[in-house]
Amino acid sequence: MIRSGVNGRAARRSCVLAAAAMPMVLSAAAWAQSFSNITPITLPTNSATGAGQPYGTSITVSGLSTRIRSFTVTIQNINHIAVGDVRALLVAPSGDKILLVSDAGSTTQVVGQTWTFSNEAATQLPTAFGVAPTSGTYRPTVVSGSALPAPAPGLPYTTDMSTLYGKDPNGTWTLYIADGFPNFAGGTIQGGWVLNIVGDVDTRFTYQGVLTSNNTPFTGNMNVRFSLFGAPFASIGETPLAPSQTKSFTNVQRGLVSTELNFGDAILTPSSLWLETAVESPIGSGFVTLSPRQAITIAPQAGRALVAASAERAPWSGLTGVPARVASPVTAYTNSVGSFTPANYGSTTYVTINQTNVDRAFPAGRVLVNWSITGFTNIANTAVNIRPRLGPFIGTPTRFFFNTAGEHVTISGTSIFENVTAGTHTALLEVQRTFGTDALRLDSQDSFTSTWLSLPN
């Protein structure tokens, strides 16, 4: 154990801190979380600017402790006489401006389409005249990159979604949708939009310690201030690597203290890190800094495993010694339904959600699925389980509780299927009512998207 003490004038209120454990727990596996704003947007037919109504719909992300590994933006239930007029600009909390689509998709009419934009998508939307788009996943597609009307921010824009990789996802995301030719034809975005964020390294860690006073475990109340430094000893003019964090502890028993700390990206620095603690007891008496500082290290995993960008990006061609699983091509399928035929699913046993099923050919190996569906109930306090199924293989169910009746919400989930046999399997979603008296209801305002990734052995 590391023991620290204080001396001199403040000794009458000094303590000794013994760090029983101070692990830094970082999440090695990526996670995904969806956020949605399903406010319908109307694209005008007679407008000076073509700005959608409402113009600038936002999603607020908060409480996420990881940075962005990747993300997608889904625009749901697109209806337009000449869909090539649709323009969409995403503004991230960092201020980055990503033009997702502009003057793409040809001049054809679409009804109930859903487009998901991903930097890792295989294709862009069609741009040739007369070639109709379909619901699916696309890279940002821009034919004309002129500025969108105010109050959307002005040029320059980017189409590279990876500019956000490694950045903080928390804050307000805003999507501006406008019609490039408002005097010709209008349309609607009936399902709003969905933001799906995949995070990477979790910067939180848990501090655990034992506080003693005069060799006796401390009992009572105290404040502890934690500061992160790059050196083991204090020096003139030094400042913490991140803002200090003060935690209050009440009714401490046997000296045991445990708390979660999060210094953000500062914890991922490749240099040595040292944690300084200062104790205030009684509360209000002033802090006493304990010494020595305590060394902390990142758990053995990649501290920065992001998709490299710009000059850091290396091509796959010419690389040798790549593991077989990495080198094997990934088979990806996306199944989207932009507008559901009205249906109710109230069974207490699992039943297939119509229009979510499609036959796909998979190689042997593991299959990862990310899915998202919108729906509602007519009676509050109704709960459902929704799970993916791949032929005979059953995925992990996601349970959702409807607190409010009549409100369309987005439900999403992720599952991994192990040891999938090679062949054609039906990929679908199943639903089961587990509580309440109503059903999961789908109507023409609702939509569905699933992406199936096959990882060969």
Image: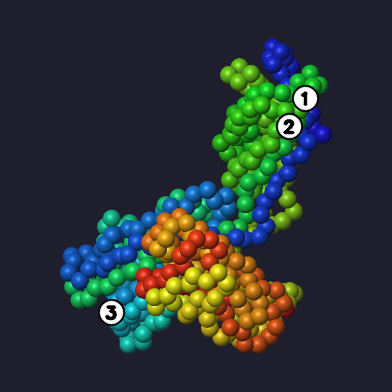
Residue visible at 36% across and 85% down in the picture: 132
Image position, residue 77 (x, y; %): 37, 72
Residue visible at 58% across and 34% down in the picture: 244
**Where does label 1 land, which residue?**
217
Question: Looking at this view, is 126 or 407 the one in front?
Answer: 407
Give me the C-alpha separation between circle 3 and circle 2.
66 Å
Give me the C-alpha separation between circle 2 and circle 1.
8 Å
Image position, residue 19 (x, y; %): 76, 34
Q: Residues within 10 Å of mark 1 (few under 14, many from 20)?
A: some
> What scheme was used to colour the molecule?
rainbow
State which quarter of the image contains the N terminus: top right
Residue 36: mark in rendering? none
Discs 3/2, front: 2
Dot 2 amino acid type = Leu
Question: Looking at this view, is 232 or 169 the one in front?
Answer: 169
Q: Quadrant of residue 8?
A: top right
| Left or right, residue 388 beside residue 321 | left
Dot 1 amino acid type = Pro
Residue visible at 20% across and 76% down in the picture: 184
Q: Residues within 10 Å of mark 3 (few under 14, many from 20)?
A: many
Question: Looking at this view, is 366 or 345 the one in front?
Answer: 345
**Where does label 3 land, which residue?**
82
**Where does label 2 land, which residue?**
256
Image position, residue 453 (x, y; %): 60, 75
Q: Check if mark 3's residue and mark 2's residue have beta carbons within 8 Å.
A: no
Give me the C-alpha separation between circle 1 and circle 3.
74 Å
